[in-house]
Amino acid sequence: MNTREEWTRFATSIEAPSAMWLNGQWFNGDGSERHHVLSPHDDTVVTSVPLATHADVDRAVEGARAAFLDGRWARISARERGAVLQRWAELVYEHRDELAALITLEMGKPIQMARDIELRAVENTFRWYGELADKLYDESPRGLIDAVALVSREPVGVVAAITPWNFPLTLSSWKIAPALLAGNSMVIKPATQSPLSLLRLAQLGSAAGLPDGVLQVVTGSGGQAGAALARHNGVDCLTFTGSPDVGKQLLIYAGESNAKPVHLELGGKSPQLVFADAPDLAVAARTVAWAITFNAGQMCTAGARLLVEETIADQFVAEVVSEIKRCTVGDPFDPDTHIGPVASRAHRADVLEHARTAHTEGATLAHGSLQERAGSGAYLDPIVFTDVQAEHRLFLEEVFGPILAVTRFTDDADAVRLANATPFGLGAGVWTSNLTRAHRLTREIDAGLVWVNCYEEGDLSVPFGGRKLSGHSVDKSIHALDKFTSTKSTWIHL
């Protein structure tokens, strides 16, 4: 499909999921309340899904526990589990158009980005962990004379995951693949706004050979279904990607129940530090523009703060604005669209409120508008503010939308001070040709991810995670397995 009309016809032909996925089949829940999934493109109802009750969550956790205890998944060989993940990757590839269309319908991501970026990431994730399955080793310490010690990793049991709406399949797959590879069973609650693609992904998992009950998907609100999962004594570990406020609350819920470990990947206010000696300022400008407009700025790693050396600030900011103006805002089913709507009208109002506050606090509006777009849908043009100060809310707080805050720095020390002057510590970019500066700044910047002369690059072999208010633990890489396994030490006297 190559045109907006073809994609729109295809999307309307899809039968969107409208039930939860429990024990290998569709389940409408014990309650009568349902949630309408709205398209942020035109405000239409795509479908409705159940609002899971406490009883529904109990059913999902109990099913996952039964699947774990009888060994239908945990006690098969790692190679067999890996083979299922690899078959799952093949099904993701075969159904990539359908899955991409569901993502576009539920959260407005431009269709080409949904298919060619998000679905490729999902496929690669299942494939990578599937290939890793039989290449993991336990340990046996050397040097013991009259004993043998074994240090082994075992699945924790039932993993609960609560995932966000901005990358509904990518961020879910980063949790599902390693958790299942380790031998766990899993209950996952997608964001209220975007459950459809994940429900279909779970169904494809069953088609790939995942036994019934090993992956359960409950739909509903965070306040009810999410809280019930976090408080559930039958859940052995909780992993969450989302806002800091919700993450903090989940820690409380875990403490109120069985003190389950909670692994958090929270927000960010990532800086890009651009020095006058950047190897290619034109590439830097294009990348800065991309990093705040991709996915309508709805990324925890969005390059939301531009810290630019004052000697080049005026020229560089003008080039960034010029690049942003080239981005097309429009129908997400149009393959030529760069920026679709934000997730909802309510979210747009929140983003614009941040922009108006920045203007009130004295930042200079260099591009964009503080008014809502007319017409249907949750569309929002990118916004750029200059003269943003370190005490401004726009400098300190995550917006989760296409607003770039520009601040000037004088020297290396000033740049590092500004980079670290927020509660967050997820990502950062450094643009310089000075190798010594690059090495020194990557050590001094307090973030879990630092890119040099690029941004948002990576591989499944490299961990993804932050520090400070951006959370702890990591997704991706072999290190993601640490969240989903427990260490056991065995001492054998000889």
Image (cartoon, rainbow, N blue to C red):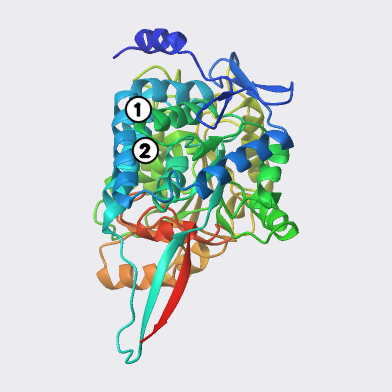
- When asked about the image quadrant of residue 489, the answer is bottom left
Q: Amino acid at mark 2?
A: Val
Residue 339 appears at what percent x and percent y? 44, 28
Image point (34%, 73%), residue name: 139
Quarter of the image with the C terminus is bottom left
Who's the residue at 32% across and 71% down the image?
Answer: 439
| Mark 2 and mark 1: Cα distance apart in space | 10 Å
Q: How many marks?
A: 2
Between residues 295 and 248, which one lies in front from this camera angle?
248
Relative vertical location of residue 168 with respect to residue 410 in this rendering, above or below: above
Q: Which of the numbered marks, if any, corresponds to residue 115?
A: 1
**Sequence order check, earlier mark of 2 and 1:** 1
Above/below status of 435 relative to 220: below
Mark 2 neighbour density, 10 Å: few (under 14) some (14–19) many (20 or more): many
Q: Quadrant of residue 20?
A: top right
- Name the residue carrying label 2: 122
Q: Which mark is residue 249?
A: none
Quarter of the image for the N terminus: give it.
top left
> In the image, residue 26 lies at what x, y percent?
55, 23
Q: Residue 367: where, in percent of width, then height? A: 50, 35
Residue plotted at (70% across, 43% down): 228
- Locate residue 91 relative to residue 304 in the image: left or right: left
Query: Mark 1 belongs to which amino acid?
Result: Arg
Q: Find residue 145 and report its horizontal and vertical position in percent.
A: 32, 92
How many residues crowd around disc 1 within 10 Å: few (fewer than 14), some, or many (20 or more)?
many
